Image: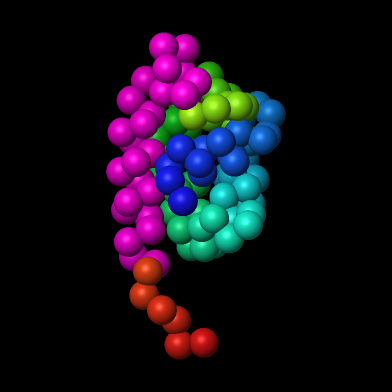
Amino acid sequence: MTAAAALVLAGCTSGPGSEAEFVEVLTRDDAFTATQAECLADAVFDQYQSDEDALGKISGATSYDFLVGEDGVEGFDEFLTAQVAECTTFDLQPSDS
């Protein structure tokens, strides 16, 4: 799943949701594993914890274009792309189960 698709899924909440809600949205339809989603949520909330406006835009976005556009969150596309790459690389090994 692309970073853009993940955020459009996450945009189904209103206001700055919690990390747990963000994880739940990212794990719907097996878009990300729980470990990957927790990594992404930690990164997003660590980066934007003091910016409630940015968290509100992230949580309420109806499209990725809005988030990365003029009225969106500055630098978000680069940040999220890097985080998805980082959070998904460590969890690619097949499990023994």
User: Residue 15: image x %, image y %?
Assistant: 65, 27
Regarding residue 20, the answer to whether it shows in the image is no
**Residue 5 colored in magenta in the image:** no
Residue at image x 51%, y 43%? 6
For the residue pair 55 and 69, the one nearer the viewer reads as: 69
Residue at image x 59%, y 41%? 9
Q: Above or below — where is 57 with respect to 85?
A: above
Tally the marks. 0
Name the dominant secondary structure of the magenta segment.
helix
Q: Above or below — where is 72 with respect to 95?
A: above
Q: Is residue 88 left or right of residue 1?
A: left
For the record, the magenta segment spans: 65-91
Q: Above or below — where is 69 with respect to 63?
A: above
**Residue 72 colored in magenta in the image:** yes
For the residue pair 3 and 74, the one nearer the viewer reads as: 3
Q: Write down the quadrant of residue 81 in the picture.
A: top left
User: Residue 79: image x %, image y %?
Assistant: 33, 35
User: Residue 25: image x %, image y %?
Assistant: 62, 48
Regarding residue 93, the answer to whether it shows in the image is yes
